[in-house]
Every structure is written in C-alpha cells, then in structure tokens.
Amino acid sequence: MAYYEFTVNVSEESKDALVNRMSEMGCLGITDYGEKILAYFKDSHDIVKLRDELISFRKVLEESGLNPDFTFDYVFLSERDWNESWKKKFQPIDAGDIFSIIPPWEQERPDRITIIIDPGMAFGTGHHQTTKNCLLLIQRHACSCARGRFLDVGTGTGILAIGASKIGFQEVVGVDTDPLAVDAAVRNIAHNHLDNIIIKEGDITAAEGSFDFIAANLFSEIIKSMAPEIPIRLDKAGLVLLSGILTGQEEEVLAVMEKVGLRCREKSVEDIWVSLVLSR
C-alpha cells in the first residue's frame, strides 16, 4: 500500500480542529511534533480534492475565531518509502524517570524500562507532551493503587498499555475505535513480548469489569462524552488519568467529572496541555 504524507504547520489553538477535520477526510493517522504534524492518507484518495479541502478549511477556522494561517506540503510514499520515512523520523525518546521509547530497530537500554513502538498508522509515538506526561503520571501514581487491572481508552499504538504492563499491572486492556490502531497496538505488544494485554476494537463500553487505573489521552470533548461510563468501570479505590486537555478546557472537564462522582487529586500542566488525576 502507498500513502500521501502531509506535513502541516499549524498553531496550537487550531490544531485540534484541523486534526478533527483531517480525520473526517479519511486520515489514517497523525503524529504530533508540536507546531508540526504529519498526517497520512491512502493513495486511493484524490490528492487534488484533499488539497482543496484543506485550503477551504482555513475559512472555517477564521469564521470560528481560530488562527487560519496553517501551511502544508505533501509527498507520495510507496510502502518501502513509508518504512524508511519512519526510521528517519522516529527517534528514541525518554519519558518520565524510568521509561525509554524506542523503535524496533534500536538497541534497548539496560538502565531504563524500554517500550518498543513501531507506530504504523496510529497515534502515540511518545513524542507528544501529553503521552510523555501520561507515562510520568502512571509511574508516579501506580504505587498508590492496586496494580491489578489497567484500562487504556483510545490506546493508539498501545504505548500507555505497554508502559502499565511493564511497571507491574497484572492485566491490561486497551480499546480503540480505529482498526488500524488496534492492529498497531497488537503488533507493538508482540514487539515487547507481553502476554497480559488485551486489545479490543471499540470505545470504553467495550471494556468489561472494573479497573484499578483508567487512562484516557483524548480530546476533551471525547473525554466529556464518555464521563458517565468511567465510574462504572472504576474500582472503589481506583484512579483515573485524563490527558489531551488544552489549558482553559480543564474546568469544563472537571465539572463533568464531578457530576459523575469523581474529584481531582492532581492537575499537571505542561506547556498548553493539562493532565488530571482523579478518584472517587
């Protein structure tokens, strides 16, 4: 299979809206590098139509009061070019005090807990600030809850699920509505030689039973929409980690969570991103 790789330079205030629009256009996956994002589409798409739809979206951003001044370029990648592109762009990175995220072609570091990620067409290479902060907060709070069952909602590449498994959670479940993410997560679990992680296609309702720790690194609107389902699956003494929330949106998220019986234990702010740790 071949792909179009779009390199988009966009302001933080307009990024979420643009990512949502590209998802509606059929984007297979996006990697976030701050003010630059890489987005991928199958080569079966009409490239002229894709280009024109992105250009016309500038007007939508402007009418919404968001910065419309994003730029983009694109290249055609054969399957071989795709693999080589990832090798050039996906570099090892440290997250938190103990984790290192590496691609399969790199050597593991004996002094760190290594998470091997071959991202494919899915979210979550570890380069985005929210992913790194989630790993740090999982590490920090795992000692204050039972390490029985862990749920990763919107698992993407499976990076948080794998991290949870490697710090001692006995059973890990990851769910994602994107079949490409499910495939990527399953492959990454195999790369890490883990046998206690189950990946399911679907939203949070696909996860059965109760969990000691629930993580969701998603857009705030998705987090708010699934709020009633979280306490149903949360153990009495369990913890919830919510991330992917832009500064200024956290109060709305907290208000919704309080209505379903969850209170904030910690708020972590990194640049423009907020992560919340909650309990009953």
Image (cartoon, grey):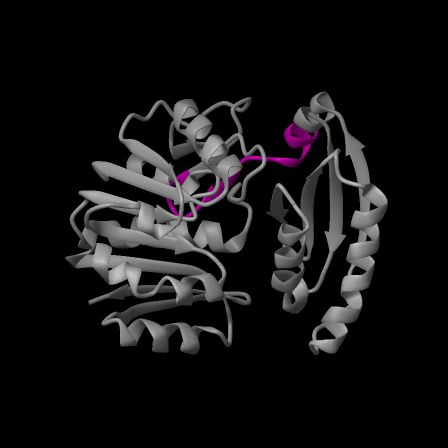
Quick one: quadrant of the C terminus?
Answer: bottom left
Which range of residues does the magenta coloring cover? 85-99
Quick check: is 13 in the magenta stretch? no
In which quarter of the view is residue 192 placed? top left
Q: Is residue 103 left or right of residue 59?
A: left
In the displayed structure, would residue 31 be above or below residue 78? below
Res. 168 in view: no
Q: Position of residue 120 (x, y in %)?
A: 57, 32
Q: Is residue 203 left or right of residue 270?
A: left
Quick check: is 94 in the magenta stretch? yes
In the displayed structure, would residue 97 be above or below residue 12? above
Res. 265 in view: yes
In which quarter of the view is residue 195 placed? top left
In the displayed structure, would residue 116 be above or below residue 133? above
Write the residue at 37% across / 61% down: 226
In the displayed structure, would residue 86 be above or below residue 176? above
Write the residue at 23% across / 54% down: 233
